[in-house]
Image: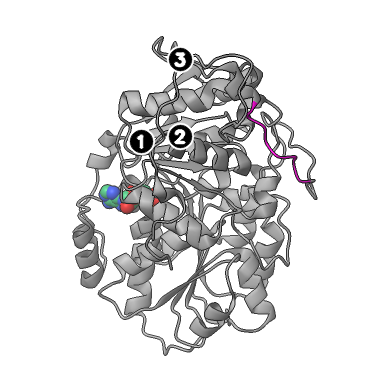
Amino acid sequence: MTTETLSAGPAFTELGLAEPILRAVADTGYTTPTPIQAQAIPQVLAGGDLLAAAQTGTGKTAGFTLPILHHLSTREVPAKPGRPRCLILVPTRELAAQVEESVKTYGKYLSLSSMVMFGGVNINPQFKALKSRVDILVATPGRLLDHLGQKTVDLSGVEILVLDEADRMLDMGFIRDIKKVLAVLPKQRQNLLFSATFSDEIRTLANGLLHNPKSVEVARRNTTVEVVEQSMHRVPQAHKRDLLAHLIRQNDWQQVLVFTRTKHGANKLAEKLIKDGITAAAIHGNKSQSARTKALASFKDGSVRVLVATDIAARGIDIDQLPQVVNFELPNVPEDYVHRIGRTGRAGATGSALSLVDDEEMSYLRDIEKLIKRAIVRVEVDPGFVPPAKHELMSDKRPPRQPQGRGAPRQNNGPRQGQSQGRGQSQGQGQPGSRSAAGRAPQGQGKPSAAAAKPSPKPGPQPAAHPKKPRPQAALFSSKPGSRGH
Ligand code: AMP
């Protein structure tokens, strides 16, 4: 989204939303609807089905949440426990938590209740919550099916269905789960489908689901690319960790989101940064939900400067004004690059994305440049950067890889990560769980740089090129209490 489009359009008060909703919006400080909101809100209020092309970062969540709250609060229906009136299906638990947070924020002056439901966490509190009234249920498909199987949720009262980030849900292999859910919904309902991209699969889904939908589109696919300043350094994989620490200090980055291709790489990088005195946390599918929520909260409140994430764990991370994204490794699926850099440059702000590219990643770079139809600016590495001494790299071994159950490495343009998530995994459904992220191709892992950053107890064959700095203690990696999620 660009600033220019942001300034156009009506005020929130002109959209026909109920007063308590407008008051809640005013409390957030938003003055003008974003383009997706200006277009989608009247359409949803009119009651028909909607097909919306909008990426994360466009304000799409409020685009559907506000009119849904309006409908539910103005159409009084006797509430029944565990029988939601609106179902919002999302691909990941992070997104589920964020969407429900929006529901709570915008619905705070209404007497509607909401619940978030995802896998990878104890199901019992969800059973308990479903014994009370739930007007809006935000769920990932797998855990929802578990509840349906156990008859702890009743979807016969759903008036409005939202499929949010539908493209991602299909990429993650949720189509069968979605169809099972659709089969138990009442025929008479309003359907809203949001997707960043429109593949044939999405069109097929939309054709089967939506009746005479209005369609709204706010930005061409990959438009984020145009508002984010993108550059890259050519750097051997083995030097990347030290270079990143150098860049963070040199540029005084206070909030930087770093993408690694593997969970192991994310951990090791966070550990390395902490050893270098830079507060950091890792977020990926092997972390518990509470650890992930805590890491995200610390990153949002500024007590952690660097959040290291794998692609899927970062999906839906909603941080206003995130200024800097770093691709520690390039993704081998070019679309993932667009999703990654879309974490910055949001809501009209400018952002910057820097990629650290090893020789072996040059083919990924070419694929990405082809997709985004522009060259990523090559910038020389600061001559003041001193690469790590050879012995430090040689001591940098990673533990042997675990065999991966469905572990054929991904081909370029192949199925996206998480596709192996099938039905019936009550743990980790709809989230970057162990299977999904393990499905990533292990590129770069055999290289010295993707290895562990354990300080070597052994002296290396050569003296260090630069004296070791004292390592300040950074306690934030695992011990700082964070805010609780939903
Ligand atoms: P979304 O695309 O729903 O993930 O929203 C992207 C970001 O835009 C979120 O951080 C919202 O808080 C923010 N946002 C949503 N609506 C507005 C608005 N009307 N004005 C400014 N920021 C907004």
Secondary structure under the numbered disc 1 in the rendered image: loop
Q: Residue at x 56, y 36 (%)?
A: 260
Q: Indicate the position of residue 116 as horizontal and vertical percent values.
A: 48, 70
What's the CA distance linking mark 2 and mark 1?
Answer: 8 Å
Q: In this view, does 466 lie to the left or right of 365?
A: left
Q: Is residue 378 magenta?
A: no
The amino acid on which the numbered mark 3 sits, given as a three-letter code, is: Val
Q: Can residue 88 be seen in this view?
A: yes
Q: Is residue 433 above or below residue 191?
A: above
Region of the chain picked out in magenta, as a range: 395-402
Q: Which residue is drawn at 67% across and 50% down?
A: 436
The disc at residue 386 is 3
The disc at residue 345 is 1
Q: Specify the principal SS of the magenta part.
A: loop
The amino acid on which the numbered mark 1 sits, given as a three-letter code, is: Gly
Please say which color scheme the image uses.
one colour
Mark in the foreground, 3 or 2: 3
Front residue of 247/207: it is 247
Answer few, some or many: residues within 10 Å of disc 1's Cα (few below 14, many 20 plus, some between 14 and 19).
Answer: many
| Image quadrant where residue 252 sits | top left
Q: Does the residue labelled 2 lie within 8 Å of ligand 1?
A: no
Answer few, some or many: residues within 10 Å of disc 2's Cα (few below 14, many 20 plus, some between 14 and 19).
Answer: many
Front residue of 39/333: it is 333
The disc at residue 341 is 2
The amino acid on which the numbered mark 2 sits, given as a three-letter code, is: Ile
On-image quarter of the N terminus: top left
Q: In this view, does 454 lie to the left or right of 26?
A: right
